[in-house]
Amino acid sequence: MTKLTVKPKERQELEEEEKQESKVKRRQAPGRTVESRENKIISKAYDLVEKRIDRGTATSQEVSHFLKVGSTLAQLEKEKLEKENALLQAKKESLESQKKIEELYASAMKAFGIYRGEEIEDDSED
């Protein structure tokens, strides 16, 4: 049911309700970061669509969007992406750890060389 198909009396009630809601709302300061501003806009969009769904005035695109988001397939895809992100993070940490181990190994080899009486090559002047 779109606004165009709402009866005049119902439309008038909706408009009055919107006026009352706009009087009650306080103006919030804009977000300090781009992410906070985006989140604020997204939140407002969700609130608006929720009101439209409750009133029965939501478009088919709005309703189908939330049906897709709430589907089992979408939830499984989201879970898969979260696990892939965790795996990538673990790989990154493993590579960083491996790099530290290689640096420790190199310094240990250098120290053993000193104990054996080998000459020290200065790597700092490359």
Image (cartoon, rainbow, N blue to C red):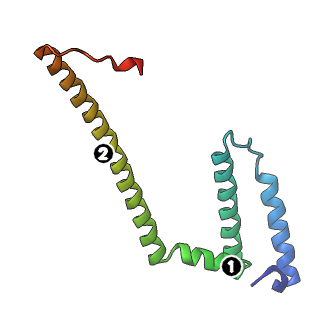
Per the image, the residue denoted by label 2 is 94
Residue 67 sits in quarter? bottom right
In the image as oriented, which residue stretches furthest toward the left?
A: 116
Per the image, the residue denoted by label 1 is 61
Residue 9 sits in quarter? bottom right
Please name the residue shown 16% across and 20% down the image.
113
* Mark toward the viewer: 2 or 1: 2
Per the image, label 2 sits on a secondary structure element best described as: helix
Number of marks drawn: 2
Instruction: Decide which of tag 2 and tag 1 comes sooner along the chain.
Output: 1
Per the image, label 1 sits on a secondary structure element best described as: helix
What's the amino acid at mark 2? Answer: Ser
User: What is the number of the mark on residue 37?
Assistant: none
In the rendered image, which quarter contains the N terminus? bottom right
Please name the residue shown 24% across and 15% down the image.
120
**Other-residue count near label 2 (Cα within 10 Å), few / some / many at <14 / 14–19 / ≥20:** few
Asked if 106 appears above or below 40 in the picture, the reply is above
Residue 119, percent from left and from top: 21, 14
Q: How far apart are marks 2 and 1 (CA)?
A: 44 Å
Residue 93 sits in quarter? top left
Q: Is residue 45 left or right of residue 88?
A: right
